Amino acid sequence: MEANNQERTKLYDEFTVALRQALIDFHIEPLGAAQINQLVGHYAMMMEWNRHTNLTRITAPEEAARLHYAESIFGARFLGAAQRVLDIGSGAGFPALPLAVASPQREVTALESNQKKTLFLHEAKDALQ
């Protein structure tokens, strides 16, 4: 059990480093520590849920940081002054969740038809506030 915890901690540390680098690569202003912690928390939940519910095939720290999180946040550049965003087919929460974390002034709604994925989104929202 201790080995599993160490492996998870290593995975989340790798994700954190990869996320910070991906944000730099995309020329996105650095996020605050609380925002990074929220995204790491989402990644951790996604990894746990992905064991029994097919949320995404992209789970490696570098790929997830870049293709899920940084690209989602990068998309905010195309929203202009929009204060409300609807993500249809949100799946594991992309781009809705990273957008909501990076742009807390926006009202972001995630819409998902798959009941298991919807349950994940509700759990993630509650856990990450």
Image (tube, rainbow, N blue to C red):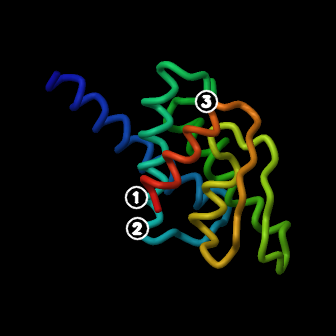
Q: Residue furthest left?
A: 2
Q: Residue 115 at x, y = what percent? A: 66, 32
- At 63% from the left and 64% from the top, the residue drawn is 100
- At 64% from the left and 71% from the top, the residue drawn is 103
Name the quadrant containing residue 106: bottom right
| Residue type at the position of mark 3 | Lys
Describe the element under mark 1 as helix, strand or loop.
Answer: helix
In primary-sequence order, the first of circles 3 and 2 is: 2
What is the distance, in whole Å, between disc 3 and disc 2 at their CAs? 27 Å
Q: On the image, numbered disc 2 is attached to which residue?
A: 34
Check contact, mark 1 vs mark 2: CB within 8 A.
Answer: yes
Name the mark on residue 37.
1
Q: Residue 129 at x, y = what percent? A: 47, 62
Name the mark on residue 116.
3
What is the distance, in whole Å, between disc 1 and disc 3 at their CAs? 24 Å
Q: Nearer the viewer, residue 67 or 100?
A: 100
- At 83% from the left and 75% from the top, the residue drawn is 82
